[in-house]
Amino acid sequence: MKTILTVDDSSSIRQMVSFTLSEAGYNVIEASDGKDGLEKIKKASNVNLVITDLNMPNMDGIALIRKIRESPAHKFVPILMLTTESQNEKKMEGKQAGATGWIIKPFKPEQLVAVVKKVLP
């Protein structure tokens, strides 16, 4: 079973992502911000995908992606940004940091599952 780390400061978004992906057969780990996400990915040996919000307290999504990419163990883990931001500058910043893809909130559960299946065959 593939493991997905979802990082968002909104517990309702985390619950929705977690529920949607669990229903689709994935194991989901939740983190409340970038710092929490970084600690959890270091502890978990087998995270196959990270889905992170952009705007969060303590450590934002861009900083989290950069930190994950610095770790040799997680250099190639796909990272999706799940955010209300649709500005091209933010997308470019995310891509430069190492984001694999981008999902705009609000999202439909089937859209999330479709994107995850594309990234995690």
Image (tube, rainbow, N blue to C red):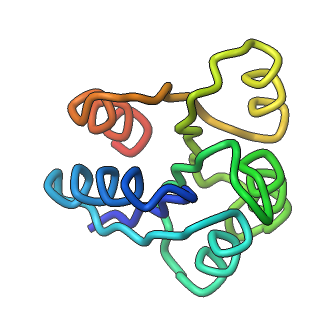
Quadrant in the picture for residue 73? bottom right
Query: Which residue, as the protein is rendered here, is positioned at the far top?
Result: 88
Residue 84 location in percent, x, y? 57, 28
Q: Where 5 sits versus 88, above or below?
A: below
Residue 33 location in percent, x, y? 65, 64
58 on left or right of 22: right
Quarter of the image containing the C terminus? Answer: top left
44 on left or right of 87: left
> Residue drawn at (64%, 25%), measured in percent from left and top?
85
> Residue drawn at (33%, 35%), measured in percent from left and top?
112
121 on left or right of 75: left
> Residue drawn at (61%, 74%), measured in percent from left and top?
41
> Residue drawn at (43%, 61%), measured in percent from left and top?
11
Residue 71 location in percent, x, y? 79, 68
Quadrant in the picture for residue 25? bottom left
Disc count in the image?
0
Query: Which residue, as the protein is rendered here, is positioned at the far left?
Result: 23
Quarter of the image containing the N terminus? Answer: bottom left
Q: Where 98 sits versus 65, above or below?
A: above
Camera-nearest residue between 121 and 9: 9
Residue 98 location in percent, x, y? 76, 40
Quadrant in the picture for residue 72? bottom right
